[in-house]
Image (cartoon, rainbow, N blue to C red):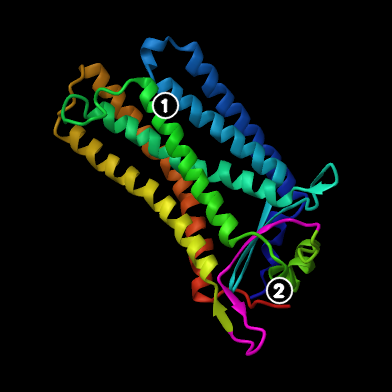
Amino acid sequence: MNPSWYFFIFMDPFHSYFVWIITKLSLFSNGLLLFIIYSTPSANLGAYRYLLSVFAVCDITTSLGHAGLQPYVHMTSTGFYFFPRRAGIKISLETFDTVFCFIFMATYYQTFLVLAYHFIYRFKVATSGLQISFTNYWSSREWIRTGIIVYILYIGGFFGAVLFGMIPTENSRRNVPSEIFAIYGINLADARIGYTNLILRRKESNSGDLAWRIDAIFSIIVCLSLIAATAIVIVYCIYRTVAAMKHGNLLLSPKAKRMQRNLFRALLIQTSIPCLFSYLPLAIIFLLPFSGKLLPHQR
């Protein structure tokens, strides 16, 4: 099947209008959320206002990063290539395409971690006074400090994985599939163009056979492990929170119970969106190259 019928989705002018509209909506909705947070009496939200603020700011940075980079993800039978729409971004005559790809990935992947923070908070509120934990007596400062440390380790893990197995090399540039230039008009073989790539198998120069790349496999395992860790935390917190609500063990007033249930339902709905549009696409992008069932890797 010729896939050219859907190329208009990521080509101008459709893509530019789409990004412009989505970015505007994101800035407006998150800006409105920040306004509501800080115009609402602090007693009504408590420390949760800070977590909501972090989520809104992260969403804004992701939207701005996507609008600025507008990345392409081109998949082949051996992996994928990730590169900016307007390749050749230079600052003081130095190319920063790869750096901006890194920054975008950091703002993109942080969504999963921030969602995990939300579920941890909701879980701690729902089970407050019902369990013994060393975190029961933590102050807001200790939670913030721990959150920052986990954030640094989490994003650092992704950066390390990308540096280890996804940055362009001379060999990867020589093996860039020809259809990338034909489709997008961007020559990734040019050393002045930066990108990231995850190529799981590489053609051997002697035999011509495809051989697995250990560095790329290690990188993808690290990335999937980090994403899986946030998913495990979220699932655990959902299970424990639902159990506490189901058995009526919340040590809260009836009004507070209703509010917590409504907030929890809203969080579940909020989580379904990145699961559908982030977790699932990432799983496809990361795992399908193992099967080798995509478009042929051409030269």
Which numbered disc flags the more N-terminal residue, 1 or 2?
Answer: 1
> Splitting the image into 4 quarters, where does residue 255 fall?
top left
Q: What's the amino acid at mark 2?
A: Asn
Graded by Cα atoms within 10 Å as few (under 14), some (14 to 19) or many (20 or more), the crowding at tag 1 reads some
- Residue 176 seen by the camera: no
Decide: is 282 above or below 63: below
Residue wearing tag 2: 175
Q: Is residue 108 left or right of residue 229?
A: right
x and y, in percent, of residue 269 in the image: 40, 39
Is residue 195 in the magenta section? yes
Q: Is residue 187 left or right of residue 56?
A: right
x and y, in percent, of residue 101 in the image: 66, 49
SS assignment at label 1:
helix
Q: Is residue 255 left or right of residue 60?
A: left
Graded by Cα atoms within 10 Å as few (under 14), some (14 to 19) or many (20 or more), the crowding at tag 2 reads some
- Which quadrant is the N terminus positioned in? bottom right
x and y, in percent, of residue 124 in the image: 27, 29
Is residue 152 in the magenta section? no
Residue wearing tag 1: 144
Q: What's the amino acid at mark 1?
A: Ile
Decide: is 91 above or below 222: above
User: Residues in magenta?
Assistant: 192-209
Q: Magenta residues: mostly which secondary structure?
A: loop
Decide: is 36 above or below 208: above
Residue located at (70% from left, 61% from top): 7
x and y, in percent, of residue 52 in the image: 46, 26
SS assignment at label 2:
loop
Cα–Cα gap, marks 1 and 2: 45 Å
Residue located at (62% from left, 45% from top): 104
Front-most of residues 196 and 239: 196
- Residue 173 seen by the camera: yes
